[in-house]
Image (cartoon, rainbow, N blue to C red):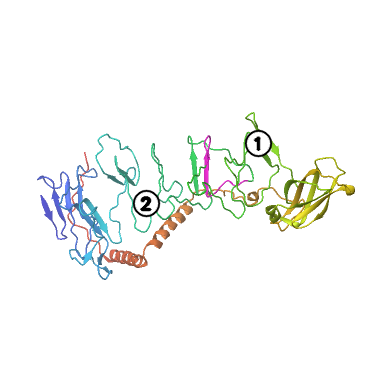
Amino acid sequence: MSTTDENNFIAFSHHGGDWPSGAVFWAFPGEATYAPDQGFLASGIGNDPHVKIGGQFGGWFYGVRGSGGLSVDADAQHEVWPPVIGKSEFKDGPEVNDYSNFAGVLGTGIFVTGVAGTSVNNVGVYGQTEEDADASIPQNLSAGVVGAATTGSGVVGWSTTWNGVEGWAYQGTAVLGVSDSGYGVQGASAWQPGVLGWSTNDTGVTGGSGPEGTEGPPLPDGQPTIAGVVGTSDARPGVIGTSNTAAGVFGFSNIIGVAGQSTKRAPAGYAGYFLGDLSVTGQIFAGVKDAIVPFPDGSKRVLHCMESPEHWFEDFGTAKLKRGRAVVRLDADFAKAIKRSDYRVFPAPEGDCRGLYVRRKSAASFEVRELMGGKSNIAFSYRIVGRRKDIKERRRFAKLDTRLPLAAVAARRGRKAEPTAAGLRAFSARAEKDARARRPKRVEAARRAFVVRAEKEARARPPIVPKLQPPRPERK
């Protein structure tokens, strides 16, 4: 049965019984001076409706189509009030595409949410693609939005000029990825970083390997504990870098490019370990400099370097006296590397004579003679030491502070603030501000005007209550 009153209130009973027994379906068309709270209402007796399906619709394009907000002039791009429906020059949402052209439910709007799903203790919106023949989709998930699939993506986000997927969280993780046999999180980009991590008060990106909860040794006191990237592992390398044509790991800093430290001394541990040649263009500061030399028995032995308080190059050679005299020319390449005005020569006779001394030195050669005017014709060897030409300034026994400079500026993790209601409001305001900043100014101005106008209309509209109100008898 159906009935209508003077307010265009229409009621339809789902069966032919007397009003109001059984479930009832009401339609509220509304008019210029009256806007009902809902368009349709299905209910039953009292507060316990017995309706399996409130409404079921089907169509060639849409099963259900709903729109809200203003209509917009597509050419002039200005809002029109009240909305004009059914004219091609006006629209109430974005243009449809292959995803929205055929749909079971289409919700669209200009300044309002197209489709909203909410729940107190369950899923607000559930979306699924593909059949779940093996019942692999987990049950009892609880979230505002749950997307499910068996072989495809459960949720896909797309943006032409901004974030495809965006997550905000006040205390928890904004975006969480978990996988059993695939990637937890994967990022790829053609012209920007594949993955970007940034933190104001903590590490930008932390990576760990091994059983969850295990990690490498803690850094000693005085060393920085937070960084742009931190890698840690109990039994594996914390960080690995590889490259075919460039550096596997590149460190650059105004203080220290790369720092390494070990809790154990060689051979049990090393702060740095290089399997191959080492090239250094600057100075090397070391407590002890050793050479590792292979021996015929297959072992490797340690030989130590001789040290000097100044920078010297040295060369060795042999020559022969002729009637107690010999002029030895400097090696041409060696002469280019030393200060030829200040070098030392140490001759050593290789035969019986009265002794040798250096008679004269020049930029190209030096002269060796036998002591006491001797006339021997013996061979001799020599060692020549010259100051390095490429080092302009030299200080003997220069003082050096070997403490790690990073210790003085080591960043410490600040104390994490306890969550508060005020902090939550501030974080929410930040998210809203960020969203507004990305919205075009023209659209934001139109949205504000729409909200103000809608609120004004609602206050000015006189409430009209339908006279046809089915009684709600108490249940026995």
Viewer-nearest residue: 399 or 334: 334
- Classed neighbour count for the residue bearing mark 2: other residues with Cα under 10 Å, few (<14), some (14–19), many (≥20): few
Q: Residue 206: x, y in percent?
A: 50, 45
Q: Is residue 233 in the magenta section?
A: yes
Drawn side of residue 428 relative to residue 389, left or right: left
- Residue 331: tell me if it is visible: yes
Q: In this view, does 360 lie above or below 139?
A: below
Q: Is residue 161 in the magenta section?
A: no
Cα distance in 3D space between marks 2 and 1: 58 Å
Judged from this view, the residue extending furthest toward the right is 372
| Residue matched to label 2 | 165
- Name the main secondary structure of what is drawn in magenta: loop
Q: Do the residues labelled 2 and 1 touch (CB within 8 Å)?
A: no
Helix, strand or loop at disc 1?
A: strand
Question: In terms of sequence position, does the residue under pointer 2 or pointer 1 come before the other?
Answer: 2
Q: Give the number of the mark in front: 2 or 1.
A: 1
Query: From which residue to which does the magenta span run?
Result: 223-238
Quadrant occupied by the C terminus: top left
Residue lying at 16% horizontally and 57% vertically, measured from the top left? 9
Mark linked to residue 240: none
- Residue 398: tell me if it is visible: no
| Residue matched to label 1 | 293
Q: Could you tell me the amino acid type at mark 1? A: Val
Drawn side of residue 257 relative to residue 73, left or right: right
Drawn side of residue 20 relative to residue 356, left or right: left
- Classed neighbour count for the residue bearing mark 1: other residues with Cα under 10 Å, few (<14), some (14–19), many (≥20): few
Q: Residue 57: x, y in percent?
A: 16, 49
Q: Could you tell me the amino acid type at mark 2? A: Val
Q: Residue 445: x, y in percent?
A: 35, 67
Viewer-nearest residue: 54 or 392: 392
Q: Residue 401: x, y in percent?
A: 71, 50
